[in-house]
Amino acid sequence: MSYNNLLLEMHGKVALVTLNRPQALNALSPELTAELSELLDHLEADDSVAALVLTGNEKAFAAGADIKVMKDWSYMDVYKADFITATWERLSTFRKPSIAAVAGYALGGGCELAMMCDFIIAADSAKFGQPEITIGTIPGAGGTQRLTRFIGKAKAMDMVLTGRMMDAQEAERCGLVSRLVPADQLIDEALKAAERIGELSAPVIMMAKESVNRAFETTLAEGIRFERRLFHSTFATEDQKEGMNAFFEKRKPVFKNR
Ligand code: CAA
């Protein structure tokens, strides 16, 4: 597999995918998002891959959708292509655990892409924003929806209506980011987190992820019922037996992903 806009490195069972259009601050062109979607299909189907870390470079995770490409598109162009959902949304349905490792700008579609990951680890240099309003449009890949669920209405309105950027400290304080680290430790920290997840039971990790994501889609009562059923399902796995027996035998569990 070779891509024009992405780099793929395997670190054990963790796929480190780097957005690689530095000359355009990793602006998310249709070619880039199509490549990412295709790569995610491969990574999801490959049993040797346990988790994904998605990153950019020191200056930018991604500065948004490619304005140069879309500036002259008509309503019919974007409507007929269902612009954004078709390929961008692939990350939000990726079943394996995914971590965004963000340094520099994560703006517009860049912020939205990071939010499609399961969680975000940010370098102290990270800057988040939904500046679409400043170029005469609104977020189109979940910015008004995911951001609002993550940081609440007041902050989301502030970001979306003014287009201002949020620094990494503010992003951590308001719950957009799970961990904040010095820039030179970003990739190590994200890989370590992904490797830890990769040591655990893959199917049970998938259930945990599915259950947390359900919290954004349903009522508390329904969500708890959904969680209960998945919790029950873990008892049908060999890995639950292994995990609990290993605890009592005072040894590290060896999960078989079954
Ligand atoms: N699309 C296309 N090209 C972009 C880009 C984008 N989103 N962001 C940056 N670039 C390009 C610039 O055009 C420039 O290219 P040239 O060297 O050929 O001129 C190069 O990347 C470097 O950018 P700057 O010179 O602007 O760098 P800077 O350090 O002065 O500023 C920045 C950095 C503040 C991030 C600024 O580039 C910027 O504001 N970018 C646009 C951010 C934005 O509005 N994003 C939202 C896009 S819309 C969207 O994402 C819709 C959606 O919801 C999916």
Image (cartoon, grey):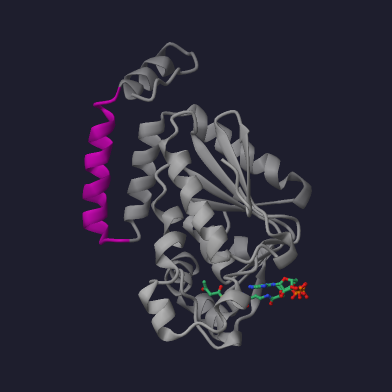
18 and 21: which is toward the camera: 21
Residue 133 location (% of width, % of height): 56, 85
Image quadrant in which the N terminus is located: top right
Residue 172 location (% of width, % of height): 61, 60
Q: What residue occupies the far right of the structure in this picture?
A: 184
Residue positioned 37% across, 50% down in the render: 212
Q: Is residue 176 visible?
A: no
Residue positioned 38% across, 52% down in the render: 93
**Residue 117 falls left or right of residue 85:** right
The mark tally for this picture is 0
Q: Secondary structure of the magenta portion, mostly?
A: helix
Q: What residue occupies the far top of the structure in this picture?
A: 249
Stretch in magenta: 217-237
Residue 252 location (% of width, % of height): 50, 17
Residue positioned 57% across, 82% down in the render: 71
167 and 16: which is toward the camera: 16
